[in-house]
């Protein structure tokens, strides 16, 4: 059986927002090649992280893969902006998508990996017809945009939802990746990986745990991933 490759995607929102360039260089230095970038319109979700012009500037200073998660009520506008910037993967929310298939095709025609994101309570049944069109499905495990509430925990059905999606993908013999976002912590990573998660959005409860270096935290994240992979083999 081939070994699964798990991608660690550090969330740019957890880096030092006053020193983004040095933050990205530090992430590169520890050997990570993917950067998770949230694009939020302040309407779909209450916070507003990075502006489009900031993302344009970041694109100029790094060759990392930009994994963009759009949280907006106007998907097509932000999708086109991200295509113009030259990102590597775009997910957008089905909850605000009127023309979901059109948006997926728009992204894929540009040679960019495309997928949809689902809020915690959104059922997997929304994927019935579009799953084969998705390179990735991003599952939010907390409610998007409320991450500043440090007491908010992953929804209790997080692992079950990942397992169910993994079964759907396997049943259709697809190569769709499962991305998980929201309190993807050292404690929760093993179970999420065992359940089938392929891409881990790493934030303040894993790669950016305070008072430890990025290098030390990365070792701990990799150990948690290994636990999950080994449990999945048994």
Image (cartoon, grey):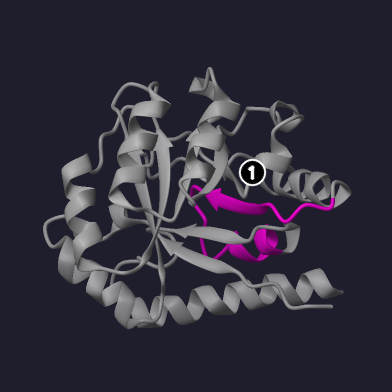
Could you tell me which residue is drawn at 40 percent across and 27 percent down?
76
Label 1 sits on residue: 134
On the image, which quarter does residue 217 sit in? Answer: bottom left
Q: What residue appears at the point 17 percent right and 71 percent down from the top-left corner?
A: 22
Regarding residue 145, the answer to whether it shows in the image is: no
Q: Which residues are magenta?
A: 173-193
Q: Is residue 41 above or below residue 197?
A: above
Classed neighbour count for the residue bearing mark 1: other residues with Cα under 10 Å, few (<14), some (14–19), many (≥20): many
* Position of residue 107 measured from the top left corner of the image (x, y, whole percent): 48, 41
> Going by the picture, which residue comes out furthest to the left?
18
Instruction: Determine the residue located farthest toward the top in the rendered image.
Output: 98
Q: Nearer the viewer, residue 5 or 149?
A: 5
Is residue 116 rendered magenta in the image? no
How many marks the image carries: the answer is 1
- Residue depicted at 28% across the width and 49% down the height: 85
Does 179 lie within the magenta span? yes
Q: Nearer the viewer, residue 43 or 177?
A: 177
The image shows residue 31, relative to residue 102, as above or below, that is: below
Residue nearest the viewer, comparing 199 with 135? 135
Is residue 121 positioned above or below 203 on the image? above
Which residue is pictured at 71% across the width and 39% down the height? 131
**Where is residue 97 drawn, in percent x and y?**
52, 22
């Amino acid at each position: 059986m081939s070994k699964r490759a798990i991608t660690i995607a550090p969330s740019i929102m957890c880096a030092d927002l006053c020193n983004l360039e040095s933050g990205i260089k530090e992430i590169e230095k520890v050997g990570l090649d993917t950067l998770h970038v949230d694009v939020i319109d302040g309407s779909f979700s209450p916070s507003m992280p990075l502006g489009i012009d900031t993302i344009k500037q970041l694109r100029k200073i790094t060759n990392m893969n930009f994994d963009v998660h759009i949280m907006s009520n106007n998907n097509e506008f932000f999708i086109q902006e991200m295509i113009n910037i030259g990102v590597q993967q775009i997910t957008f929310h089905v909850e605000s998508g009127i023309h979901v298939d059109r948006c997926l095709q728009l992204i894929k025609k540009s040679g960019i990996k495309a997928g949809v994101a689902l809020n915690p309570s959104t059922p997997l049944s929304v994927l019935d017809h579009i799953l084969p069109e998705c390179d990735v499905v991003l599952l939010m495990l907390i409610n998007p945009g409320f991450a500043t509430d440090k007491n908010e925990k992953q929804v209790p059905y997080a692992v079950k939802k990942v397992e169910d999606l993994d079964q759907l993908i396997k049943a259709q013999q697809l190569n769709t990746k499962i991305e998980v976002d929201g309190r993807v912590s050292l404690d929760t990573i093993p179970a999420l990986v065992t359940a089938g998660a392929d891409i881990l959005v790493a934030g303040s409860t894993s790669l950016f745990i305070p008072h430890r270096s990025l290098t030390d935290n990365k070792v701990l994240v990799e150990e948690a991933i290994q636990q999950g992979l080994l449990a999945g083999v048994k």
